[in-house]
Image (cartoon, helix red, strand yellow):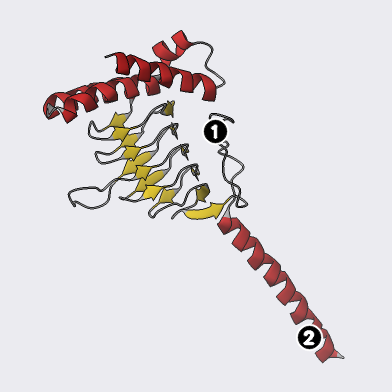
Amino acid sequence: MIRLFKLIREDIKAVMERDPAANNWLEVLLCYPGVHAVIFHRIAHGLYKRDFKILARLVSQISRFLTGIEIHPGAKIGRRLFIDHGMGVVIGETTEIGDDVTIYQGATLGGTGKEKGKRHPTIGNNVVISSGAKILGPFKVGDGSKIGSGSVVLREVPPNCTVVGVPGHVVIKDNVKLKNMHRDPIDLDQVRLPDPIAEELECLRKRIVELEKKILELERERSL
């Protein structure tokens, strides 16, 4: 019980550090569904590990009804998880989440197929999963990585990378590793993300312009 209260205190502190809208700890405790969902999950997970699986699922369903966040009681969640807003977040049974992870509304940590065993992703430390992102399958998202809004990730993500697109493309951030969150805040920017598809389209556009110029030059030479 003492450990549970310690974890809850850390969860509240994490929200205060990462959400500029949070004014004080009491507001976070009373008004943040992400915090409520994590508290419910810690209780449900404890019951699940003690083989009270039906009771654990009942607690998780009550949490889903109250918060709009669905976390299977079998999922393993680390310390200081921040689920911002949270409506529509789904976290599957064999998901493993490290410390200091941030998840925004509509994100899914899901599985593929009907196979037994490990079928959901493993999320490293200091990872940011943006709004509407889908991470599907039993692979790892490395420490310090960021999943862009609306991305669909179907394969492993190395540490300190940004993923955007459908399916997700890994874009390394100038080969610069993210700093430790205990020294600097987690990078929560969900807008200024690289777009490899847009970059490829821009390259094609420039190439087309060059080819059009060459065609015009050839036509002028023939007309002379």
- Counting from the top left corner in percent of width and height, residue 80 is at 42, 26
Tell me residue 151's x, y (percent): 46, 47
Q: In the rendered image, is residue 61 in sight?
A: no
The residue under the point 12% across, 29% down is 51
154 over 33 or under it: above or below: below
Nearer the observer, 74 or 135? 74
Image: 116 above or below 66: below
Q: Residue at x 31, y 18 (%)?
A: 3
User: Counting other residues with Cα less than 10 Å from the Cα at mark 1, is it few (<14), some (14-19), or many (20 or more)?
Assistant: many
The C terminus sits in image quarter = bottom right
Tag 2, which secondary structure? helix
Q: Amino acid at mark 2?
A: Leu
Would you call the spot at circle 2 few (<14 residues within 10 Å), some (14-19), or many (20 or more)?
few
Whether residue 17 sits left or right of residue 40 in the image: it is right
Asked if residue 99 can be seen in this view, the reply is yes
User: For this view, does 88 lie left or right of residue 26?
Assistant: left
Front residue of this view, candidates 91 and 7: 7
C-alpha distance separating marks 1 and 2: 55 Å
- Which mark sits nearer the N-terminus, 1 or 2? 1
**Residue marked by disc 2:** 218
Q: Residue at x 57, y 45 (%)?
A: 177
Residue 186 marker: 1
Q: Quadrant of residue 93?
A: top left
Res 223 → quadrant:
bottom right
Residue 102 horizontal/vertical position (percent): 45, 32
Label 1: state its secondary structure: loop
